[in-house]
Image (tube, rainbow, N blue to C red):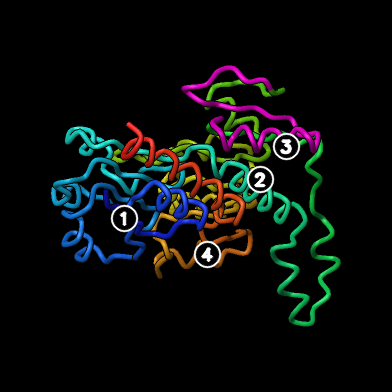
């Protein structure tokens, strides 16, 4: 059995695959190279960079498994793969802690202006007066949109900070944490900070657009460590400029890397940025590699 690892994998995961006798090609393919190579392989493992399109699936005459090391599957044509009888695997829980902590890091950076004061102090400034009006997280209401694995990890940490946590998830209505479930409209209207942890579904529009911003409190903080395209960046920029959204923390973007058209949002003084690294910690990568490798072996070798 042969497998392509197109976007890298932890050593621990590669060891599991090799021990099981799988022949590995660990290489970053261009789209054209992938179309040429895929007919010889039984499986492909990707992260977020490589796109497993209908064309790739059609070319993969021997494909039995498409594996995604991570949570989202928006770079894989899942429905078409299923139509062709190809199993799609992912690791929905392996990076949950890292992503939750990334969301919290943006919240902390925004609440006390550390995302801005560092560069200004390095430039020789002493912005004590400007940044003395941050805010405490204790007692604030955090609205979590999507209470899956990541949302629950964030809720645990927020509760540890004595925040009030409310949540909306169309598929989840119970939790063993002190979280109050509300409607999406209630969450938008009552949260001081909103953190998104929902998938981007192909063919669907923005989960947060003009109508949703209109429901939010004035001066709300919005955190997106979910997926680019979940939030309308155009409407977010407008909401920032009007003060409806006071601050935003963004790890994911509609275009990655961002293009010139996103410059105004990227340069906005009230935006904290990170380059889609929510799940990119050594700990998460090790867990992802081990989990997805074991799943692949179970499907290709042990059955």
Q: Find the residue positioned furthest to the bottom.
A: 124
Q: Label 4: which residue?
A: 266
Q: Nearer the viewer, residue 145 or 277?
A: 277
Q: Residue at position x 45%, y 36% from top?
A: 211
Q: Secondary structure beneath disc 2?
A: loop
C-alpha separation, residue under disc 3 versus residue under disc 1: 44 Å
What residue would you read off at disc 2? 219
Residue under the point 57% across and 49% down? 284
Residue annotated with mark 1: 23
Instruction: Give the CA distance from mark 4 to mark 3.
Output: 27 Å
Q: Earlier in the sequence, mark 4 or mark 3?
A: 3
Residue 77's spot in the image, x, y percent?
26, 43
- Which label sits in the foreground, 4 or 1? 1
Q: In the rendered picture of this protein, how many numbered marks are placed on residues?
A: 4
Which mark, by number, is residue 158? 3
Give the x, y percent position of residue 133. 82, 55
Between 121 and 97, the residue placed more toward the observer is 97
Residue interval drawn in magenta: 147-176
Disc 4/disc 2 C-alpha distance (Å)? 19 Å
Residue 247 left/right relative to 41: right
Q: Secondary structure at mark 4?
A: helix
């Amino acid at each position: 059995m042969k497998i392509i690892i197109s976007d890298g994998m932890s050593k621990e995961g590669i060891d599991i695959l090799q021990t099981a006798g799988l022949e590995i090609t660990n290489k970053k393919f261009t789209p054209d190279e992938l179309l040429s190579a895929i007919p010889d392989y039984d499986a492909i493992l990707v992260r977020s960079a490589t796109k497993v399109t209908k064309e790739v699936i059609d070319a993969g005459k021997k494909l039995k498994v498409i594996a995604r090391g991570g949570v989202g599957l928006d770079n894989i044509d899942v429905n078409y793969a299923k139509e062709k009888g190809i199993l799609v695997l992912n690791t929905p829980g392996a990076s949950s802690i890292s992503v939750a902590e990334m969301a919290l890091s943006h919240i902390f950076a925004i609440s006390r202006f550390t995302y801005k004061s560092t560069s200004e102090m390095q430039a020789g400034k002493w912005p004590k007066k400007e940044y003395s009006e941050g805010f405490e997280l204790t007692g604030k209401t955090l609205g979590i949109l999507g209470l899956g694995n990541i949302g629950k990890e964030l809720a645990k940490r927020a509760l540890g900070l004595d925040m009030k946590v409310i949540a909306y998830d169309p598929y989840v209505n119970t939790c063993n944490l002190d979280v109050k479930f509300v409607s999406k409209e209630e969450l938008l209207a009552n949260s001081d900070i909103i953190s998104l942890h929902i998938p981007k579904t192909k063919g669907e529009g923005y989960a947060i657009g003009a109508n949703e911003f209109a429901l939010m409190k004035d001066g709300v903080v919005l955190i997106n460590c979910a997926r680019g395209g979940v939030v309308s960046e155009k409407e977010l920029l407008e909401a920032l400029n009007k003060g409806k959204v006071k601050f935003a923390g963004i790890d994911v973007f509609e275009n990655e890397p961002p293009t010139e058209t996103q410059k105004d949002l990227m340069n906005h003084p009230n935006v904290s940025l990170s380059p889609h690294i929510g799940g990119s910690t050594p700990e998460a990568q090790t867990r992802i590699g081990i989990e997805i490798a074991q799943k692949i072996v179970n499907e290709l070798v042990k059955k």
